[in-house]
Image: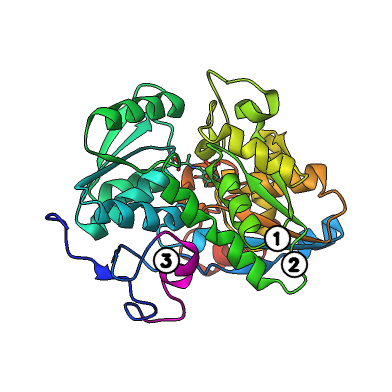
Amino acid sequence: MSESRKQLPLVEGAAFSGTHVPLIERYHERLPFDPGDPLVSLQEGSTPLLRAPVLSEMVGATVRLKLEGANPTGSFKDRGMTCAVSAAVREGAKAVICASTGNTAASAAAYAARAGITCAVIVPDGKIAQGKLAQTLVHGARVIALKGNFDQALTLVRELTDTHPIVLVNSVNEYRIEGQKTAAFEIHEGLEGGLEALCIPVGNAGNITSYWRGFKEIGAAPKLFGFQALGAAPLVEGRVIDSPETVASAIRIGNPVRWEDAMAAATESRGSIRAVSDEEILAAFRLLASKEGMFCEPASAASVAGLLKYGADGAESIACVLTGRGLKDPETALANNDGRIIPCLPETGPIEEAVLGDP
Ligand code: F0G
């Protein structure tokens, strides 16, 4: 296993304790790993599926939120990354690389650190949220700030990995899709009556591809409704967007690598891929936080924005995927909050006024 740190062996249920096991162990029968394979895990997966009473009331159906921000690095990427990095270690790789709008970078950096291998990430300069950048740096990855966008970064890392022995862990990597499909299994297992519609944000389109693969494998067929940001909606417009723009920096992507797969997922499931504006994304983001107690990042709120805008074609059991945790992007949260902070002197009168006075 080269010089990378020796990994825990893949033995069902043996290596980890706690309320749930790593997803490669939990779903080992459906994933391309064998007993004894190296396992790089941070105990990802098994995330909550939470009922959303306010949204359910608004939509007139049962709406649940799949809380992927509960994964170890705060996004769904960990499902794919445990598989991609475990496979890379199995192959004897010493380094992984990705292009990223932030979350893939944070996840790759964490799993590479855990595996004792090197990680480099290429991110669009100034266009990734601070929490994601902090995570990536603290895990010790090499961060390259590209004077360009995500799509250019991805083209460059694909070229680089064609000519150098570095494993690419973007969702062109099949292990990423394999790992992420497990979220579909979890939702299906968590619902007795099954799921009729899934709402999901779409950027590079790996996740919608993964969910559809997962649902198909277990014979489930909810409609998949994918949502892109209006200024970064290549799949909706049917053309590459050269300069994508959106407040939801995670899905600021103009040329998704899983384009055909995503279109197939929408068509085969009798769903669709549509666009939501930044205003609609931010309204859903605030609604989730203030009415459901759920602080997600803006890109994640695109799933709920889409549901509120377009409905779910009569579905009665709906899940919205909240792909990442709100703490990832404190700048956007602070910039889009109408609550004000009340300055106050440390005295009884001003405190009373501040707490009890008119807002
Ligand atoms: N939501 C979040 C929070 C994301 O970080 C991403 C993608 C998506 C949704 C879209 O998922 O790309 O599979 O369609 N983030 C990637 C990254 C691109 O680099 O972190 P997708």
Three-letter code, disc 3: Ile
In the rendered image, residue 13 lying in the magenta stretch gets the answer no
Q: Are marks 3 and 2 in contact (CB under 8 Å)?
A: no
Q: Relative to residue 158, is residue 239 drawn left or right? A: right
Q: Which of the two labelled residues, at mark 2 and mark 1, occupies the earlier sequence position? A: 2
Q: Residue at x 32, y 57 (%)?
A: 86
The residue range painted magenta reads 17-32
Q: Residues within 10 Å of mark 2 (few under 14, many from 20)?
A: some
Q: Residue at x 31, y 47 (%)?
A: 136
Q: Nearer the viewer, mark 2 or mark 1?
A: 1
Q: Are marks 2 and 1 in contact (CB under 8 Å)?
A: yes
Front-most of residues 84 and 225: 84
In the rendered image, residue 27 lying in the magenta stretch gets the answer yes
Label 2 beta carbon less than 8 Å to ligand 1: no
Whole-percent x and y of residue 288? Answer: 67, 56
Residue topped by disc 1: 220
Q: Relative to residue 33, is residue 269 drawn left or right? A: right
Determine the CA span between mark 3 and mark 2.
23 Å
Q: Which of the two labelled residues, at mark 1 and mark 3, occupies the earlier sequence position? A: 3
Residue topped by disc 2: 194
Q: Quadrant of residue 110?
A: bottom left
Three-letter code, disc 2: Gly
> Which label sits on residue 153?
none
- Extreme residue toward the top, this view: 242
Mark 3 lies on a secondary structure that is helix
Three-letter code, disc 1: Ala
